[in-house]
Amino acid sequence: MKLFKLARKWLLGHSKYYQSDHQLKLVLLVSIPCFFITITALFLAQISIYLIAFILIILALLCSYVVVASKLNSEYQIRTLSNLIESMIEGDYTLRGRLQTNQAFQELLSSINELANTLSQHKIEAKESRLLLERIMEQMDAIVLATDESGLVVMANASAKKLVLENANNVNKVQLSSTLIGAEIVNATSGIVDFSHTNLTGEHFLLKESFLSEGKNHQLYILTNAERLLMEKERKAWQSLLRVLSHEMNNSLTPIAAISQTMQSKLQKINDEEQKKSLLEGIGIINERADSLSEFIASYSQLAHLPKPNTSKQELVMMIDNLAALYPMCKVKCLVESELFIEVDKNQFEQVLINIFKNAVEAMSQHDEKTIEVSSKKEGIWLHIIIRDHGAGIANLDNVFVPFYTTKNQGSGIGLTLCRQIMFNHNGLIKLKNVDKNLGGVEVTLSLPHA
């Protein structure tokens, strides 16, 4: 742009005076000798002085016309170039110069027209790239923010506007450090940051990078949910492990089951009843354990092949009341507000509630009166469903979501792991905590995004 302005200044200034001075010198260089030659010839021809004066006036007018016409033509060319350059300075690349008879001027116009075409194409490509970038950013779950050197927000995607800027009317006038979450983001260093706000909770990975825009320093902030990333990595790891274990154990169990069945059929032909009975019992135990291991593997396989949720609007109170009928030995207190709807896969979310209710009932097995309390609470974009029992509590909270881990004699270690996977697929969270060391009890919080 500075180059265009300098070129325009030169064309309107220096060239204008240069052209006028140059043309005046040429006219004087040609006309003065002609004047002297004409006057000398007229005097030698002894023509009337009035006729000589008339001829000189005509010659002077002709010279003046040539000078004025040449000057106007030069000014027209300069103003044409000036207008073209000025339109490009303003960002308008649609203006073009017309065809000229002057070959040199036409070559210059062609170069400027070609420059305008190139700049117009670059402008379109830059605009398309920006629109594509904005569309990608709007679809990202991550929070993306950019601030100028004074800390004012200059760019924010949908997640950032909703969670950090709290749907401010004019994002470009918001000081990032003026919001609670924004101040924590500005003061934090790149890495894992633990948030405990209404709109943003849990561990998130923060990336801070500086960049230049229009010669000024800007700051870029990208915030992603670290818990979801770690859970996804962990899920893929144990799913791979389950697939390997299932494959290897099935390879062993299949021939064991086949051989035991063959042996059982052959043992039927033995005449010694006591020996026959003893061997059949042994074979029966082998069959029973093989079937039990097969069922055990099958139960874990459903974790690796859990279908995507088919969500629909469900009334939470009705869902809880229906499931409470499955546990007549326990009183379920539903403190959830009426007509509260959630967007979930009915079958999968019911399985989550069933697993939690079942664990609560088992935890209160030593109590004469068993009570489960279900309540709800809204915080920002989250709807929290809180399920509380009065059992013995959980001895080791750190391992409750680890596959294969269980503290129950008949447990498989799959229930809570399956619950977390279902909540993960619903973009939600599940958290457990012991309510009181003395009174006992566990509080399970199911968090779902809520419009």
Image: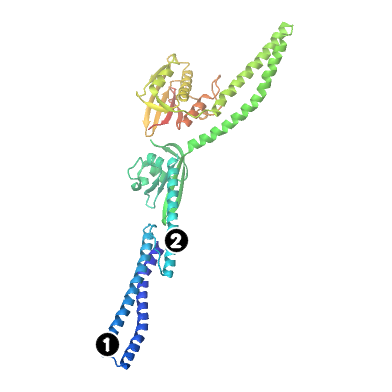
Colouring of the image = rainbow
Name the residue tied to disc 1.
Answer: 51
Residue 394 to residue 264: above or below:
below
Query: At which x and y percent is residue 125?
Result: 45, 52
Task: Depth check: give the residue in front, 201 or 391.
Answer: 201
Query: At which x and y percent is residue 134?
Result: 42, 45
Q: Secondary structure at mark 2?
A: helix
Query: At which x and y percent is residue 225?
Result: 46, 38
**422 sits to left or right of 70:** right
Name the residue tied to disc 2.
Answer: 114
Q: Secondary structure at mark 1?
A: helix
Task: Depth check: give the residue in front, 423 or 131.
Answer: 131
Looking at the image, which residue is at 72% across and 11% down?
267
Kind of residue indicated by mark 1? Leu
Residue 13 appears in view: no
Task: Depth check: give the residue in front, 410 or 288.
Answer: 288
Kind of residue indicated by mark 2? Glu
Picture quadrant of residue 428: top left
Q: Foreground mark, 1 or 2?
A: 1
Residue 156 to residue 432: above or below:
below
Query: At which x and y percent is residue 424?
Result: 48, 31
Classed neighbour count for the residue bearing mark 1: other residues with Cα under 10 Å, few (<14), some (14–19), many (≥20): few
Residue 230 to residue 397: above or below:
below
Q: Quadrant of the N terminus?
A: bottom left
Picture quadrant of residue 258: top right
Residue 263 appears in view: yes
Looking at the image, which residue is at 31% across and 82% down?
59
